[in-house]
Image (cartoon, grey):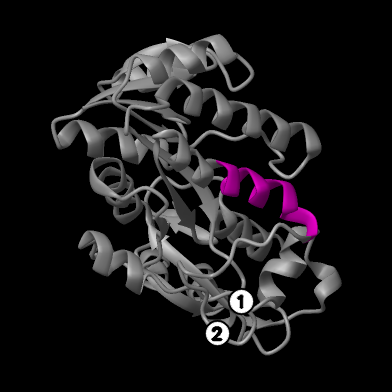
Amino acid sequence: MRIFVTGASGWIGSAVVPELIGAGHQVLGLARSDASAKAIADLGAEVLHGDLNDTDALHAGALGSDGVIHLAFVVPSVTEAATRTDATAIETFAAGLAGTGKPLVISGATLVTPGRPSTERDELVAAGPIAARITNLRAALATADRGVRACLIMLPRSVHGQGERHGFIPQLIAMARAKGVAGYIGDGASRWPAAHVKDVARLYRLAVERAPAGAVLNAVGDEGVPTREIAEAIGRRLNVPARSLPAEQFGGMFVHLLSTDMPASSTITQELLGWQPSHPGLIEDIEQGHYFI
C-alpha cells in the first residue's frame, strides 16, 4: 500500500514511517518545512510539501494514496483555529477517499471515565474544553457512511521511548531538575495510561492494514501508572526526593494531568487486531536512563 502520513517527521510519525516501510508499504509524508522534508526523506519516504491549511496538498495526497494516517496537529490543539483546521483536513481526506473503502486513521486521546479504566466502547461525548476535538473525531468516524474505512487511534497521556524530547515525561524531568524534587499531587494515586512509541507505531500499521470501519482503538500498553511511581522513578535517576507538592507549584495543564485518575484499557484493541505491546513499560523506560542524557 501507498500510505499518506501527516506528521511524518514528528515524534510518533518518525516511528510510524519506518514501521510501515519495514512491512513493505510505501509512504508519502507531508512536510511543512525543509527540515521536515529532510527528516522524512531520511526515513525512506517520499515527500509532499505542504501543511494542514493546504487543502490542495491534502486532497492530492489522499487521492494518490491507498490510505491516510493523520498524525499532525496545530499547537495548541484545543484552540478554535486549530480544531477548525483539523476538521477541514479530515473532510479533505474523506473527500479524496470517498467511495473507495480505503483507510483513514485519525488520532485522538484516550478518554477519562470516572471510577474505571476507559475502553474503546465508551461514548465520544462532545463536552468540556475538548468538545470541538471530540466533534472532529465523531465526524471522522461518520465518513464510514461515505465509503471510507475510517477508524480512530486513541493515544495515552505518555507515548514514551528513546528520543522523546517534548512530551510530558521530559517536562516532568525538567521540573524535577529545576525544583530539586520530583513532585506529584496529593497521594500520587492518580494514574496515567502509557505506551511505548514502537508499540504505538505497530498499532497504526495494523489499523491501516485491517482495522474495520468505525473502529476505536486504544493504543495503551500500561493501563494506569500512578503518578507517584512516575515521580519516584524520576527521583531515583536524578538522585532527588520524590514527594507530594502543592498543586500551585505545577503549571497549567499539569494540575489536571497529575490530579485526574485517567486509566485506559486496550483489551478490545488487542483482541480485534492481535496487537500485543512488547516494548518496555513507562517505569522501565524511565529507569533505562535515556531521558537523562
User: Does residue 179 appear anywhere in the picture?
Assistant: no
Q: Position of residue 241 (x, y in %)?
A: 61, 80
Amino acid type, label 1: Thr
Q: Residue at x 42, y 51 (%)?
A: 214
Where on the picture, by quarter, is residue 288? bottom left
Residue of label 2: 116
Does residue 213 appear left or right of residue 205 in this picture? right
Residue of label 1: 113
Helix, strand or loop at label 2? It is loop
Q: Main secondary structure of the magenta part?
A: helix
Q: Position of residue 151 (x, y in %)?
A: 42, 47
Does residue 22 appear left or right of residue 217 in this picture? left
Mark 2 vs mark 1, CA separation in Å: 6 Å
Q: Residue at x 59, y 43 (%)?
A: 139
The answer to whether the residues at label 2 and label 1 have Cβ atoms under 8 Å apart is: yes
- Badge 1: how crowded within 10 Å, few (<14), some, or many (20+)? some
The residue lying toward the viewer, choosing from 164 and 92, is 92
Please tell me whether residue 228 is drawn above or below residue 177 in the rendered image.
below
Which residues make up the magenta segment?
Answer: 128-139
Amino acid type, label 2: Arg
